[in-house]
Image (cartoon, coloured by chain):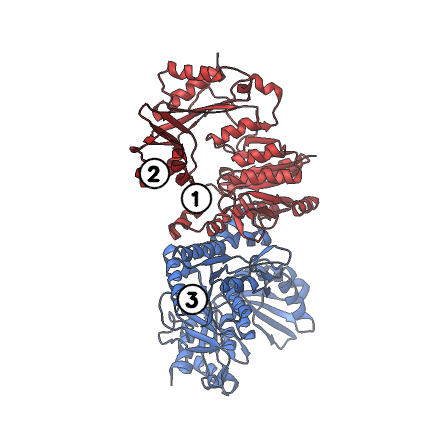
Chain colours: A blue, B red
Amino acid sequence: MALIVQKYGGTSVADIDRIRHVADRVMRTRQAGHDVVVVPSAMAGETNRLLGLARQGADVPSDRESDVMASTGEQVTAALLALVLDGRGVPARSFLGFQVPIVTDASFGRARIREIQAAALRAALDRHEVPIVAGFQGVTADGQITTLGRGGSDTTAVAVAAALGADACEIYTDVDGVYTGDPRMVPGARKLERIAHDEMLELASLGAKVLHIRSVEFAKRYAVPLHVRSSFVDDEGTWVVKEETSMEEISVAGVTCDRDQAKVTVAGVPDRPGVAAMVFGPVAASGIVVDMIIQNASADGTTDLTFTVPQADHEKARRILEGIRTQIGAAEIRGDLDLAKVSIVGLGMRTHAGVAARMFACLAAEGINVQMISTSEIKISVVVAAKYAELAVRTLHDAFITGP
Amino acid sequence: MALIVQKYGGTSVADIDRIRHVADRVMRTRQAGHDVVVVPSAMAGETNRLLGLARQGADVPSDRESDVMASTGEQVTAALLALVLDGRGVPARSFLGFQVPIVTDASFGRARIREIQAAALRAALDRHEVPIVAGFQGVTADGQITTLGRGGSDTTAVAVAAALGADACEIYTDVDGVYTGDPRMVPGARKLERIAHDEMLELASLGAKVLHIRSVEFAKRYAVPLHVRSSFVDDEGTWVVKEETSMEEISVAGVTCDRDQAKVTVAGVPDRPGVAAMVFGPVAASGIVVDMIIQNASADGTTDLTFTVPQADHEKARRILEGIRTQIGAAEIRGDLDLAKVSIVGLGMRTHAGVAARMFACLAAEGINVQMISTSEIKISVVVAAKYAELAVRTLHDAFITGP
């Protein structure tokens, strides 16, 4: 007998019929002799509806009160699933963030879990109830409601699994696992049976929407076996697991593409100490997250600073820099939205030499110009013109995964 | 400077525009120098939508989980109003049942308030914030969410006003006060300036929808001055106040009509001790609330027992009685749904003799047959055929209120 935490995403609880299917699966898992804890998301679209209502209420709605509103989405699905199970004779009980409690810091809208007290959930399991823990929400030490940010229900599930020492955390979603590439873009993409936490972390941070990045961090830190699978079919999905030696035999586990990229260039600034701080200080202070940065020294004692930001922050970043342009002595501020970031990820890069060189050669052979490069121990990302995005992904997938 | 609790009903917070109007009124009250605590209902229709979803989930949905779902309606409006005020520079903070806390018993769906701890609300007022207390909801001593039943936000507001020792509790609704009769039925109906708690209690229990009956009980017990008024206009509404001697000068304060009545007759039962207990025991055990009861002795040693129930319980009551018909020796079970209960209410009945006789004479003069009668110290109710309901109300309103 195992203890399994099952998290169901928004499309898996989108309406009463889907919720009945979730109840079926919970009951089958119980019948197989396991204890189950369920973590549902809000019905698909509900969080957006609630936050849209908040934005109608105020130009810059209070984060604290937005969280009070947004948390109702998961409250409804948790209670609804509990009463569907209860109606079929399976004792079940909803737990909201404050009832578990799932204690977080007070960063409304993107709170971090500090502690999950497992006693109440354990008591429910001891009574043979199915605890249904509302995803996405927590409570501060002084009793205020928080939410964990987009995809936060994944993190709720993994954190609950860690707190209970669960045998597995199953993430049910509308895709049936983690793929070597986006199947809509790469016809040859195949589902991975296993992937290491670190690879999954890179994929998640590179725009793969399948798992919330913090949930993977949690799973890694507390060694929770994660199983990403579809709630629409019964096939096994992808296990996100502790790194194993055999994983390094494959150099590249996946190819990703992130189109939510914009580039800002501060051209012709004097090449002297402190200029980068003058540029990035105000940008960071306004809450904009800068991803890649490159600096090209030119002959005349000036330099170009180029960096990427999410597209939504592009205008804001340009306005900030225009405001300080004369002060920093820059000639011009330029922007570019027609970009994509294409990345390859794999533990094998640590041991397989020459992966980067081979990547650049593949792209060059197709005439794709690389505008920016960033690397980590297990990934290489390049920025290319948006029009080359699909070609780059397919080329790299063919070279590193499908063939030769 | 006064402390005023303002409760806004579902039509007063039906959409973002109406909520902005509520914010306007709260701000005007603050500008007049008063402290304000607001208690919003759910947006009109939202509670029904949520409970409908619960009924889709199970034939007999868990009361506990239904409350978790239903309470989200007020959670959303409380947070939305808080962020609208906050967006206009008025510090405001939502308080859910568990955050105040509003401690109730564990009768899910119709919980009763046991205690309201005022410290957190007082602290918010001391910080010059507007506390927005979600109506309708509470929390049990062990942290489970409860709701107070239909109209429960009225009770939340009055209980909060009592706990804070507020100077007044304003109930904002879509009517501009308490009328001597339903204006849709009685053209001459007029708004009462003042009404005593006991009169309001009778009116509320007789089908006047303007106030939740328990809110009036609370207001009476804790001497909270209640002001029922419209959120759509600025006119004064009706004050529900402590009884004053002058109120007895008017014999009848209002005429009401309740069409949600059904009659069940157990005909031809042996007229011996214990029969009534055999009839009403099983009916009460099934949770059906019986209102009026009459028993007619007949010549042959048998009797007819007739009682009224809400229309929704009519079929259930008949089925229960059919099941025990032979056991109690009854000849027949009959039902009737074409009924209305018409009542007159007034403190003056205590001192004005002959009100009942005059009431029956008025009805008889119009050819209206009285089927059942029930009285209290300050009200007389009669059951008549549904087709006579309007005529009866108008006749009694003319006789006791408009003229002579």
Q: Nearer the viewer, residue B398 or A287?
A: B398
Q: Nearer the viewer, residue B366 or A224?
A: B366
Q: Position of residue A90 (x, y in %)?
A: 41, 59
Image position of A80 with respect to B182: above or below: below
Decide if residue B76 is in sight here.
no
Question: Label 1, label 2: how many angstroms apart (C-alpha)?
Answer: 31 Å
- Secondary structure beneath disc 1? helix
Chain ID of residue with mark 3: A
Q: Position of residue B50 (x, y in %)?
A: 44, 48
Q: Position of residue A332 (x, y in %)?
A: 60, 65
Mark sitting earlier along the chain (1/2): 1
Are tags 3 and 1 found on a single chain? no
Q: Is residue B151 left or right of residue B132?
A: left
Q: Position of residue A388 (x, y in %)?
A: 43, 72
**Residue B321 has which mark?**
2
Count neighbours of disc 1 (C-alpha within 10 A) and say few if under 14, some if 14 to 19, many if 20 or more. few
**Residue A200 has which mark?**
none
Q: Provide the residue designation for mark 3.
A: A172
Count neighbours of disc 3 (C-alpha within 10 A) and say few if under 14, some if 14 to 19, many if 20 or more. many
Are tags 2 and 3 found on a single chain? no
Please identify the quadrant where the N terminus of chain B is shown: top right
Q: Is residue B91 left or right of residue A191?
A: right
Residue at x 61% of width, y 48% of height = B101
Question: Label 2, label 3: how many angstroms apart (C-alpha)?
Answer: 50 Å
Mark 2 residue type: Leu
Question: Label 3, label 1: how many angstroms apart (C-alpha)?
Answer: 30 Å
Image quadrant where residue B281 sits: top left
- Secondary structure beneath disc 2? helix
Q: Nearer the viewer, mark 1 or mark 2?
A: 2
